[in-house]
């Protein structure tokens, strides 16, 4: 919901979200913490929000990939059936994302993230007792919905509100935390399955989510620097100093778009569709990659370690993409992400050795890091902070649908052809189509300031 001033102007920061006394008490606590922190408090907020991105990997597709073999062997489920749970979660996320975005703008990311982390842990733990397809779909679908909607939107909105000049670096660090979770959670799941069973693995992952993320999300996040009397990026004066690439970013010049205004631009929908297509590739590859490498006779150890290589590549590349997106135009950065995905998709077809599996997984991880960094920066840079939660909410269904479609497409193609070759070729084509569409996603012309809220 957008607030318009009496004179018709739009405020430069999100409107207050609640007048509850408990929020006032908490804000006084956050204010004291911000005053005592010897560095910019935005970094505390960033890493607190990032903890939720770290633990969301409890239901990541790359984590589910570790469970595909034991679930299919013990319960007799097909790969399409198992991957379908991710699709159900993606569809639920598509339906819920607009509401989640509005809740973030209205009540704040802290409340949404805390609730989401709690539900994520509960859903993950309950998977230990999900021995029927229906209960598995309900539990994993709920966790996947949390993964794809509030824990996708919330942290990047927080980062984009606290950082403008250093937004690329901030979102890159969020991606680094997510990528680190991609390394740790599948590894812990694999070890637990090997020494115990897959039921124990689900319980361990769910408890980790609660322990790691709930305390910082509840106690340390503030919605905007202005709420604590600070300025974005930790600047002591209006942000008019030169950026590292020679340009200038003034807070006064930050784009101010309402959600309704943004939805009238072709740029918003080109970005959203492009993200959706690339997430088809993301999900369709991640969930099935372990099984694919095992089909290539590379062995369980190589297959699992190749996933770790991909996650490590994502982690190492996240900050690089933050640097890239601050220096290259958004369109070029986005097209570069799609181009690397095309290369990786085609390369996977011929991966039949350990070295090839590691190299191509590393290339794909580099592309996935770009997919996590570039779009959030694009939305914030093009449309500003005012209604960013709502704007992300109305575009996120494209990402969720992409994940849902990709998970099922790969499984269905394998079940029909007994091969993933056609899936990888399809993903390469989608990458080329994305590049063509993003070429037209130019920065939209600034809207009129009159009440179009």
Image (cartoon, rainbow, N blue to C red):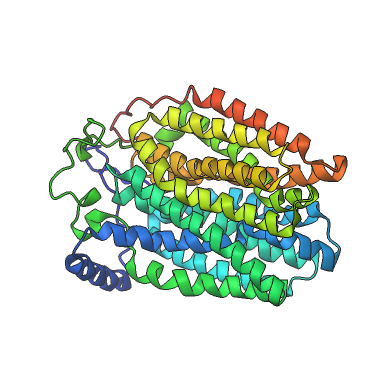
Q: Residue at x 48, y 22 (%)?
A: 440
Q: Where's residue 348, x and y in %?
A: 69, 39
> Image height check: is 219 above or below 350?
below
- Frontmost residue, 380 versus 211: 211
Asked if residue 180 lies left or right of residue 62, the reply is: left
Q: Residue at x 74, y 46 (%)?
A: 408
Q: Where's residue 193, x and y in %?
A: 70, 71
> Image height check: is 9 above or below 43?
above
Q: Residue at x 77, y 52 (%)?
A: 294
| Residue at the far left in the pictured view | 237
Q: Is residue 251 visible?
A: yes
> Quarter-wise, where is residue 252 in the image?
top left
Q: Where's residue 30, x and y in %?
A: 26, 68
Asked if residue 63 lies left or right of residue 390, the reply is: right
Q: Where's residue 409, x and y in %?
A: 75, 42
Q: Where is the C terminus found, in terms of image quarters? A: top left
- Frontmost residue, 450 versus 340: 340
> Image height check: is 1 above or below 444?
below
Q: Residue at x 71, y 32 (%)?
A: 426
Q: Is residue 96 visible?
A: no
């Amino acid at each position: 919901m957008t607030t318009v001033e009496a004179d018709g102007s739009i405020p430069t920061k999100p409107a207050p979200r609640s007048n509850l006394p408990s929020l006032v008490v908490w804000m006084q606590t956050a204010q004291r913490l911000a005053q005592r922190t010897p560095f910019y408090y935005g970094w505390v907020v960033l890493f607190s929000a990032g903890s939720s991105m770290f633990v969301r990997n409890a239901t990541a597709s790359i984590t589910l990939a570790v469970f595909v073999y034991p679930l299919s062997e013990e319960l007799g489920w097909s790969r399409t059936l198992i991957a379908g749970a991710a699709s159900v979660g993606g569809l639920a996320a598509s339906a819920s994302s607009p509401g989640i975005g509005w809740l973030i703008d209205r009540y704040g990311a802290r409340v949404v993230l805390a609730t989401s982390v709690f539900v994520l842990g509960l859903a993950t733990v309950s998977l230990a007792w999900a021995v029927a397809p229906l209960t598995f779909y309900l539990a994993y679908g709920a966790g996947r919905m949390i993964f794809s909607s509030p824990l996708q939107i919330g942290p990047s909105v927080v980062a984009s509100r606290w950082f403008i000049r250093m937004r690329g670096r901030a979102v890159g660090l969020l991606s680094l935390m997510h990528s680190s979770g991609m390394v740790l959670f599948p590894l812990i799941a694999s070890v637990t399955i090997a020494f115990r069973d897959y039921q124990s693995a689900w319980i361990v992952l769910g408890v980790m989510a609660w322990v790691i993320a709930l305390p910082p999300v509840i106690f340390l996040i503030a919605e905007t620097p202005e709420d604590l009397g600070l300025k974005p990026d930790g600047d002591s004066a209006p942000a008019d100093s030169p950026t590292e690439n020679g340009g200038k970013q003034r807070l006064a010049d930050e784009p101010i778009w309402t959600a309704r205004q943004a939805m009238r631009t072709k740029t918003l929908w080109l970005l959203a569709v492009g993200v959706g297509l690339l997430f088809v590739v993301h999900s369709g590859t991640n969930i099935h990659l372990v099984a694919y490498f095992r089909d290539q006779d590379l062995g369980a150890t190589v297959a699992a370690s190749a996933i770790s290589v991909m996650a490590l590549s994502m982690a190492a590349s996240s900050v690089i993409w933050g640097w890239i997106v601050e220096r290259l135009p958004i369109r070029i950065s986005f097209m570069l992400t799609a181009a690397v995905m095309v290369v990786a998709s085609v390369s996977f077809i011929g991966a039949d050795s350990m070295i090839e599996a590691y190299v191509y997984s590393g290339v794909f991880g580099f592309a996935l890091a770009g997919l996590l960094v570039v779009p959030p920066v694009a939305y914030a840079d093009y449309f500003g902070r005012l209604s960013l939660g709502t704007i992300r909410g109305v575009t996120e269904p494209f990402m969720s649908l992409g994940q849902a479609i990709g998970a099922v497409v790969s499984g269905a193609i394998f079940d029909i052809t007994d091969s993933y070759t056609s899936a990888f070729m399809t993903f390469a084509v989608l990458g080329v189509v994305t590049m063509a569409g993003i070429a037209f996603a130019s920065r939209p012309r600034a809207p009129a300031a009159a009440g179009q809220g």
